[in-house]
Image (spheres, rainbow, N blue to C red):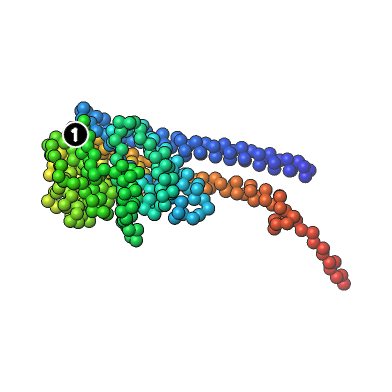
């Protein structure tokens, strides 16, 4: 009788583990592959109408994790998962956009400003592996953020950090695409850097695009006003706040900001307004739920912009945590079986009872 009950329980347990493992496999396939396809199918298509069409992919605040700040035991797994998610979403964004230009808007590394020479080499190799150049003809633009060179809080900017970033990422004051008549200006509010103005040549048919890690229209100061007056940008792309925002202000009133939710703008060239697009972070480790990549298309006199929203990784990790519970219980059972005699508190104990007195 005991053997029959034991076999019946074993059969039920066997069915449970078959269902559990099948569910776990399907969950991994969905979370790691299918969900990226699902999100990419929802992305907007920005079609080109003219020969001057310029496609720009905007990558903000990836902040690949380092090895210094996080001392928890699972930090290698956390770094691996963050790198994997960034790599998968970046490649999906490349497939969707086929960009002519890819702009990285700062905070490329989480510990770039405090990394040793050996660590920086390692971080740079990881970064290049996560965000490769898709084609030799694709223009890759990198500008620094405060996590790359310092500048926020007690993390002071140093010449060594600035020089190291320029050496590794080939940072330039300006980048120009003559075929598309577009010029990108590198402006940094943290360092007060802006390109030299000696060789600026204005073309009424050219696009003037300003890149800044920190917003220029949000809490604008004298540096922001001077940069805008000198380079007269039609579009400003920035990051730093980790969220998607858009600011449209009149050129005569640069200290006010009007946030709008629409990401499609028409005929900006002939408006007397400044436009700043703040690109959201692409990393789920930044503590925000909405993450993605900016995608802009300059097509003649028209600018189209959208955000390629990606999956919310925290939900997936929470589901994984719940799915691990049965494995923890199984490990506990195995532990009790192996160490039953010495450690397990649930082992059977031999007890000697004294007879109760009668009478």
Depth check: 73 or 170 in front? 170
Q: Residue at x 54, y 39 (%)?
A: 24
Q: Position of residue 122 (x, y in %)?
A: 44, 45
Q: Position of residue 104 (x, y in %)?
A: 31, 43
Quarter assignment of residue 19: top right
- Label 1 environment density (alpha carbons within 10 Å; few <14, some 14–19, many ≥20): some
Q: Position of residue 209 (x, y in %)?
A: 21, 41
Quarter assignment of residue 105: top left
Q: Residue at x 38, y 48 (%)?
A: 109
Position above or below: 355 against 143: below
Give the left or right position of residue 231, taking residue 83 as reference.
left
Q: Can residue 351 be seen by looking at this rendering? A: yes
**Quarter placement of the N terminus:** top right
Count of all numbered marks drawn on residues in the image: 1
Q: Which residue is mark 1?
A: 181
**Quarter placement of the C terminus:** bottom right
Give the left or right position of residue 29, taking residue 1 as reference.
left
Q: Position of residue 13 (x, y in %)?
A: 66, 42
């Amino acid at each position: 009788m005991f053997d029959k009950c034991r076999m019946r329980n074993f059969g039920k347990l066997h069915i449970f583990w078959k269902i559990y493992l099948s569910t776990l496999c399907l969950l991994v396939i969905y979370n790691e592959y299918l969900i990226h396809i699902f999100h990419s199918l929802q992305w907007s298509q920005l079609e080109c109408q003219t020969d001057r069409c310029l496609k720009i992919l905007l990558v903000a605040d990836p902040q690949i994790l380092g090895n210094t700040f996080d001392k928890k035991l699972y930090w290698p797994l956390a770094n691996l998962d963050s790198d994997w998610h960034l790599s998968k979403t970046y490649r999906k964004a490349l497939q969707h956009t086929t960009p002519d230009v890819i702009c990285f808007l700062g905070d490329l590394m989480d510990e770039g400003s405090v990394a040793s020479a050996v660590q920086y080499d390692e971080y740079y190799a990881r970064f290049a592996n996560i965000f490769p150049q898709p084609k030799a003809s694709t223009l890759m633009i990198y500008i620094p953020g405060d996590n790359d060179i310092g500048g926020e809080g007690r993390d002071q900017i140093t010449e060594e950090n600035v020089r190291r970033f320029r050496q590794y990422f080939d940072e330039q004051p300006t980048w120009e695409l003559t075929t598309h008549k577009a010029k990108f200006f590198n402006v940094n509010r943290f360092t007060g850097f802006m390109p030299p103005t000696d060789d600026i040549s204005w073309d009424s048919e050219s696009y003037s695009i300003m890149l800044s890690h920190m917003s220029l229209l949000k809490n604008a100061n004298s540096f922001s006003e001077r940069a805008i007056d000198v380079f007269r940008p039609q579009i400003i792309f920035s990051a730093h706040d980790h969220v998607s925002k858009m600011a449209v202000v009149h050129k005569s009133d640069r200290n006010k900001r009007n946030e709008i939710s629409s990401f499609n703008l028409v005929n900006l060239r002939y408006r007397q307004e400044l436009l700043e697009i703040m690109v959201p972070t692409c990393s789920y480790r930044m503590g925000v739920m909405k993450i993605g990549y900016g995608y802009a298309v300059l097509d003649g006199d028209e600018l189209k912009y959208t955000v390629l929203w990606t999956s919310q990784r925290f939900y997936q990790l929470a589901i994984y945590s719940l799915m691990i519970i049965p494995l923890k219980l199984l490990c506990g059972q195995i532990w009790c079986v192996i160490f039953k005699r010495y450690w397990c508190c649930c082992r059977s104990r031999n007890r000697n009872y004294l007879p109760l007195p009668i009478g």
